[in-house]
């Protein structure tokens, strides 16, 4: 560190060094050692504490699953100061928003805001947990008895592709279950102890980013120890990227949706794809880092980091000494809310352009 930074190191410095140490262990293949290192300081990492209970995303899923719960995301700011905004929306028009420095944090904030806005639903979940502490939710999901041939074939094909055998058939069935299908097939869902693919997709987004970072780091370090600016940037796969992977895996062919939902939309395919990868990770764990289907490996290798337009604008204005800022306006009711952003540029003569 520099002399000034060393006098009073910021909290972010320790966090960055910890992440880099775990990254180095991962690149060396010492995944079990990295896991033990984390568990030594966070023994309850994989289960919620008695004080906090389930995380807000899980609680919101339990409270509103009959209505259907979806999340939409927006992001603001340059790459190094990006802020994510998540909107939680139920099928009956209930909405709530949350922000965070990652999609995960924003989603949790939106889920918590939704529970706070509708405490009756959250209270019903608490009462249900007290009345029935041992429920089917704690048991692994099962494949559906009569889901349709395309869904059954897709589960079988994905299990073969990822070398999962029949161990993950229930998880793969969940990965291919859209929220809209749940509402029209309650009996089949209950019998199979199933849910929609939202939580699996949430997990899978982190797995995909980890796999992409691992591939990128190994490829970069194979050429030298000093990556260039683009190589050292954090790569986060977009919905468009994961939808392209989903097309290669043909997940849309077996995705269970309601009669009014086509299942071909980018978000639906992206969520299902992330959920499939999460199912594979829950079965294989870190083995997926070095043994995975060629389709997934080719996609990970071909990922390109695209500079977001906000970062490009910031770089251009900085080059010419122009200050830039954003102003935001929100209009419309919760279920039809829209955002308007205005770019405010101030040139070297002090003139303002909007």
Image: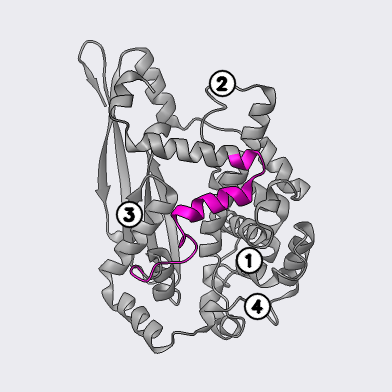
Instruction: Work out whether residue 117 or residue 301 is closer to the camera in this orientation and state it.
Output: 301
Q: Would residue 157 appear left or right of 222 to someone viewing this image?
A: right
**Res 92 → quadrant:** bottom left
The picture places residue 65, in percent across and down from the top left corner, at 45, 74
From mark 1 to mark 3, how far is it between C-alphas?
27 Å
- Residue at (75% x, 49% y) in the render: 291
Which quadrant would residue 148 be assigned to in this image?
bottom right
Q: Earlier in the sequence, mark 4 or mark 3?
A: 3
Residue at label 2?
228
* Disc 3 target residue: 98
Q: Dot 4 lies on which element?
A: loop
For the point 71% across and 56% down, which residue is it? 250
Query: What is the CA distance from the residue labelled 4 to the residue labelled 2?
Result: 47 Å
Identify the residue under disc 4.
142
Q: CA distance from mark 2 to mark 1?
A: 39 Å
Between residues 261 and 280, which one lies in front from this camera angle? 280
The number of callouts visible is 4
| Residue range (magenta) | 25-52
Q: Is residue 247 visible?
A: no
Secondary structure at badge 1 equals: loop
Q: Is residue 29 magenta?
A: yes
| Upstream in sequence: badge 1 or badge 4 | 4
Q: Secondary structure at mark 3?
A: strand
Whether residue 326 is visible = yes
Q: Which callout, 1 or 3, points at the residue further toward the start of the chain?
A: 3
Q: Are marks 4 and 3 in contact (CB under 8 Å)?
A: no
Residue 13 lies, in percent from the top left, at 38, 34
Q: Quadrant of the C terminus?
A: top left
Mark before the other along the chain sequence, 3 or 2: 3
Residue 146 belongs to the span the image colors magenta:
no
């Amino acid at each position: 560190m520099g002399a000034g930074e060393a006098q009073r190191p910021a909290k972010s410095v320790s966090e960055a060094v910890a992440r880099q140490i775990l990254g180095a262990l991962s690149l060396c293949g010492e995944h079990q050692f990295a896991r033990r290192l984390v568990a030594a300081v966070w023994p309850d990492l994989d289960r919620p504490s008695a004080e906090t209970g389930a995380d807000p995303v899980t609680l919101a899923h339990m409270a509103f699953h009959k209505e259907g719960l979806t999340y939409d995301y927006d992001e603001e700011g340059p790459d190094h100061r990006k802020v994510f905004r998540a909107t939680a929306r139920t099928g009956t028009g209930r909405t709530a928003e949350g922000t965070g420095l990652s999609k995960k944090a924003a989603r949790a904030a939106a889920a918590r805001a939704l529970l706070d806005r509708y405490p009756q639903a959250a209270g019903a979940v608490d009462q249900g947990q007290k009345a029935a502490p041992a429920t089917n939710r704690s048991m692994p999901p099962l494949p559906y008895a009569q889901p349709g041939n395309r869904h059954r074939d897709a589960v079988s094909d994905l299990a073969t592709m990822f070398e999962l055998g029949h161990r993950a058939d229930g998880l793969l069935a969940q990965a291919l279950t859209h929220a809209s299908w749940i509402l029209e097939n309650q009996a089949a869902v209950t019998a199979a102890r199933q849910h929609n693919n939202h939580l699996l997709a949430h997990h899978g987004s982190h797995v995909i980013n980890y796999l992409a970072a691992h591939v990128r780091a190994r490829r970069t370090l194979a050429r030298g120890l000093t990556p260039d600016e683009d190589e050292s940037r954090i790569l986060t796969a977009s919905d468009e990227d994961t939808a392209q992977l989903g097309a290669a895996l043909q997940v849309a062919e077996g995705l269970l949706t309601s009669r009014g939902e086509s299942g071909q939309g980018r978000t639906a395919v992206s969520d299902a794809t992330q959920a499939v990868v999460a199912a594979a990770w829950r079965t294989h764990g870190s083995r997926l880092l070095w043994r995975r289907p060629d389709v997934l490996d080719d996609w990970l290798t071909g990922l390109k980091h695209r500079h977001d337009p906000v970062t490009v604008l910031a770089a251009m204005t900085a080059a010419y000494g122009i200050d830039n800022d954003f102003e935001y306006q929100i209009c419309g009711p919760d279920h039809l809310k829209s955002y308007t952003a205005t770019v405010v540029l101030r040139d070297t003569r002090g003139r303002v352009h909007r």
